[in-house]
Amino acid sequence: MNLKTAGNPENPSSLVLTATKVTKSYAGRAVLRGVSLDLHSGERIALTGPSGSGKSTLLNCLGGVDRPDSGSILFKNLALETLDSDALTEVRRRHIGTIFQFFHLLPTLTAFENVELPLQLNEVPPSERLVRVRSLLERVGVLERAEAFPGQLSGGEMQRVAIARAMAHQPSVLLADEPTGNLDSRNGAIILDLLRNLSDETGTALLLVTHSGAAAQICHREIHLRDGEIGGQREND
């Protein structure tokens, strides 16, 4: 798997997300200790490491959910640490998609309405919303379940809907926190294939927190965290 096919690391214009010496502590305990990384358009990076190594905290900082104690996070040319809460929300709403292990679908909305919600928040016209949502649900293989509520869906179906929702606003970066951790091996493999194909088709950068070797293998690079620091990284074949 050649990183050069997923954006050119030698071309600064392909950079979408850059972390420089990011630190974060909770209740006096250091969780991140000066983490730095670059993410390019179309690139997929797996964040691996033992529980408590700082993977989810780093993902939250990179997505603008948490603020680092020190260091810098650049989304394209925006320094996230300099933005107020409203500006951070705007960046997340328009440019960053997030996929969670436990789906986080709204139980009172249908599959269609869950995927449509970020488009409503971004004031996309109804006619365009209809086309985009139907297209995404078809792409992830659950169009026939569009009117079902989350409680009527299987785990694999819920995760497909969650991926469609995360992609609905055509984000530059997709952040995925253990997206296969709550699925059986068959559905997990389907979801990994889907994420790889969507990233290839759209050029969306993917940062994937995982304990799964199979999940790491769909990525161009693997960055291993240990005790809040990068303990190593490698490029996948």
Image (cartoon, rainbow, N blue to C red):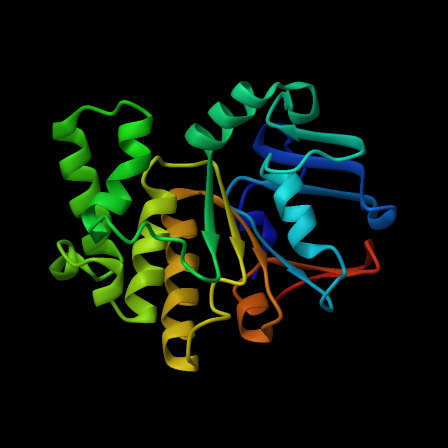
Q: Which picture quadrant has residue 63?
A: top right
Asked whether 73 or 65 is in front, the reply is 65
Indicate the position of residue 53 as horizontal and vertical percent values.
76, 60
Q: Residue furthest bottom?
A: 185
Q: Which picture quadrant has residue 40?
A: top right
Indicate the position of residue 1 as horizontal and vertical percent values.
56, 62
Is 84 on the left-hand or right-hand side of 203? right
Asked whether 75 or 104 is in front, the reply is 104
| Residue 1 against residue 57 in the figure, above or below | below
| Residue 169 against residue 27 in the figure, above or below | above
Q: Quadrant of the C terminus?
A: bottom right
Indicate the position of residue 78 as horizontal and vertical percent values.
62, 21
| Residue 182 against residue 29 in the figure, above or below | below
Is 38 on the left-hand or right-hand side of 103? right
Is 162 on the left-hand or right-hand side of 28? left
Task: Name the residue: 40% across, 54% down.
Answer: 104
Task: Name the residue: 31% across, 62% down.
Answer: 158
Task: Name the residue: 43% across, 30% down.
Answer: 93
Number of numbered discs overlaid on the protein picture: 0
Indicate the position of residue 170 as horizontal and vertical percent values.
36, 36
Task: Name the residue: 24% across, 39% down.
Answer: 116
